[in-house]
Amino acid sequence: MILYNETSRTLTLHTRRTTYQMKADAFNVLLHTYYGPRVGDDDLSCLVQYFDRGFSPNPREAGIDRTYSLDTLPQEYATCGVGDFRSSAAEVEQPDGSLLLDFRYAGHEIRPGKYTLEGLPSFTGGEGWETLSVRLQDPSSGVEAELLYGVCEEHDLITRAAVLANCGQAPVRLRRAMSLCLDLNGNLNRTDLDFITFYGGHVRERNMSRAQVCHGIQSVGSVRGVSSHQYNPFVMLCERSAGEDAGLCYGAALLYSGNFTAQVEHSQFNDTRLLIGIHPHHFCWTLAPGERFTAPEAALICSPDGFAAMTHRFHRAMRASLIQDPCPGTRRPVLINNWEVTEFHFSADQLVEIAREASKLGMELFVMDDGWFGNRNSDYSGLGDWVVNQDKIPGGLEALVPRIQALGMRFGLWVEPEMVSEDSGLYRAHPDWALGAPGRPQTRGRSQLALDFTRQDVRDYVYASLRRVLDSADISYIKWDMNRALTDVWSAALPAERQGEVFHRYVLGVYSFLEQLRRDYPKLFIEGCAGGGGRFDAGMLYYTPQIWASDNTDAIDRLKIQYGTSFCYPISAIGAHVSAVPNGQTHRSTPMETRGVVAMSGTFGYEMDLGECTEEEKKTVRRQIETFKAHYNLIQEGDYYRLTNPFQDKDYTAWEHVSPDQREALVSLVTGSARAAQPFTVLRLKGLDPQRRYRITGTDGLYGSDTLYRGDTLMYAGYPIPLLWGDYQSVQLYLEAVE
Ligand code: GLA
């Protein structure tokens, strides 16, 4: 619910459990007055303090009042050069060369439904959503901003975006355009806040980092052209005492897949400002008179009661109105992927054999990974030539796909449209289509170059060649990969003064390609991937309902990767596969049962030579697939609880999926390396109905009991875990309410 109070000039955004408020003050500065647990509609500017602070300048309208300074006031969209010395939300190089910008409130509009952003991903809205649009003007120049707020009452979600417009007579240059500026003030201007971020690298994505907010600026971000393995565009701020089940916390996700910054600034007066948006590194966008620039959307959730509740709201909101499944309401197929089995070296017959074994065990989709096209026999060649390699696949997909389908399986394909190998027909014909500045040797990444996706002609060419492949057979799925960071960011299609637009235009190019693909192939399922989880962000999830979480398929490493990923992103979005042991990334061996338990907490699949499995292992695989299918809705749509933290608890890692009606739950537990005289483990469950009685069964029939346990017993007293001998063992318990 969005309310405007004409007397106090406050705009109050209520969701079910939270309230967000801003106020246009006497000088039309748009103050941020509150964001936190739901309160009434009072004017919360009482939380804003006015003191005479040395060296904090005062705007001219304040006259001799030295208590009024932009330097000390909490603002909705902080400006630059006119008194606020903290990092600004926007920075504009004016026609006179100054960087001065002073936004003032100039009106607003409240309307039902959710705004959309042209060319950018955003929550799709739906019933119960409302939009607030606030207009800001810089009185001394023609620069304007429209601040957009989408309010989803049910999931406590507030989305934000900003559109900057040049309504003046001469071009201006936008040097910074943040999506979100949040000045936490009042009860939160204090020193016991933590900043939670997710760092990592290739094959070890999204480790959680929790650090005390200290004076100065703490930031994470990416200048790699993709959101990156290194830092994720999702961050949290919370009270020092906050944890999974209690405490105030804020989560902010940027719906963007390129360079980003997420920073928290703690000022001289203990104010805390969170900024999220496109990274200002090499960003400079020229706005001619009449032009507008849209900053990507950010999504915010405030949870007064801990991390788990925040996670549930993000998951539910993303599933309901961000992720667009091409076949909603149907179960996604269990897949087999040939990459870790064959890499680049395979024949059609070999692929059919892999698919045959997989279909016998209950798998439903065969995904042909890298190596099927052009001269692609290693990662040194072939990218860009999207034509089936007839030596490997005689007769092309027209011949192969029906053979796979005859096994009762669907067919999927790996592609990497944004890239080109120097050893390829495409590069030989169009060397200038790769990003790179003239006279400077391009830096290679995985021996490949990135195509200039800012260019429509380049995109059109790639699109047409992919279309030919997609139209040649019944393809229901593609895995869209992207295997290098961007360097040599220079486009032949833009003049020198516009090269600061290339990073962002590249992302817009990828989005528009994906949008067209979705429009032309509405039933095609697209899995995102960038060397595993290098572009695992809410922007990509708008186009690709699931993303390959990591090239690391080691079950024990995955516990951490999937733990970090789960804070913001739904389980249905997390691509996870069982692979062979010893694992290719870690050389560790884990039991097949454990690999299954871990991978089924995601979009389940296999990536191994099933022909080499023993009969016993095959039985396990078959049972895993049956378990996954039986509990599909519970896993994909249930609320996810992290029962332990794998970064702290070394003995075991446990998690739980609980159905929205609390009638069912699936508990999974994986132990670490074996210890003698292991401690007795009692696991306290979460999210159950305290009054109901549950029957517990081990999904492999080994554990469980005929005794019925009440939800409160299981949550507050706990459930004993049997002794598990050996390294990396696992248990899965299924709970069903009987009354
Ligand atoms: C990336 C992906 C892998 C695989 C290879 C193929 O690394 O993350 O899953 O598809 O590319 O080259």
Image (spheres, rainbow, N blue to C red):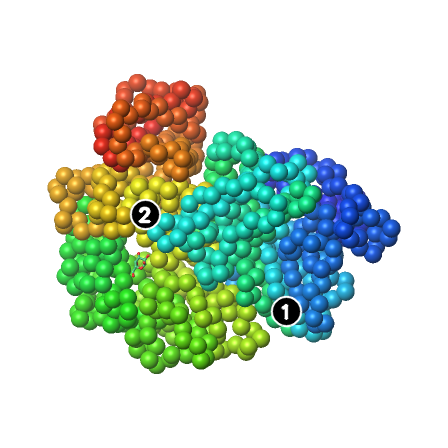
Q: Is residue 328 above or below residue 593?
A: below
Residue under pointer 1: 173
Which of the pair 133/551 is nearer the observer?
Answer: 551
Inspect the image, locate mark 1, and give the three-letter code of the amino acid beneath it: Arg
What SS does tag 2 mark? strand
- Left or right, 352 with respect to 371, comes to left
Name the N-terminal-most of marks 1 and 2. 1
Residue 323: horizontal and vertical position, in percent? 44, 51
Seen from this angle, which residue lies furthest right?
64
Secondary structure found at label 1: strand
Q: Is residue 20 visible?
A: no
Q: Amino acid at mark 2?
A: Ala
Task: Find the residue positioned furthest to the top.
Answer: 707
- Disc 1 within 8 angstroms of ligand 1 (CB): no
Residue 517 seen from this side = yes
Q: Which residue is mark 2?
A: 576
Q: Quadrant of ligand 1?
A: bottom left
Where is residue 657 shown, x and y percent of the image? 38, 35
- Residue sitting at 54 percent across and 69 percent down? 501
Which class describes the residues within 10 Å of circle 1: few (<14), some (14-19), or many (20+)? many
| C-alpha distance separating marks 1 and 2 | 43 Å
**Relative to the observer, which residue lies in front, 403 or 501?**
501
**Quarter of the image that includes the N terminus:** top right
Q: Residues within 10 Å of mark 2 (few under 14, many from 20)?
A: many
Residue found 28% across the figure and 71% down from its top: 381
* Image position of 684 (left or right of 127): left
Residue at (46% x, 57% y) in the render: 227
Which residue is found at the position 44% from the left and 67% from the top?
A: 487
The foreground one among 45 and 94 is: 94
For the C terminus, the quadrant is: top left
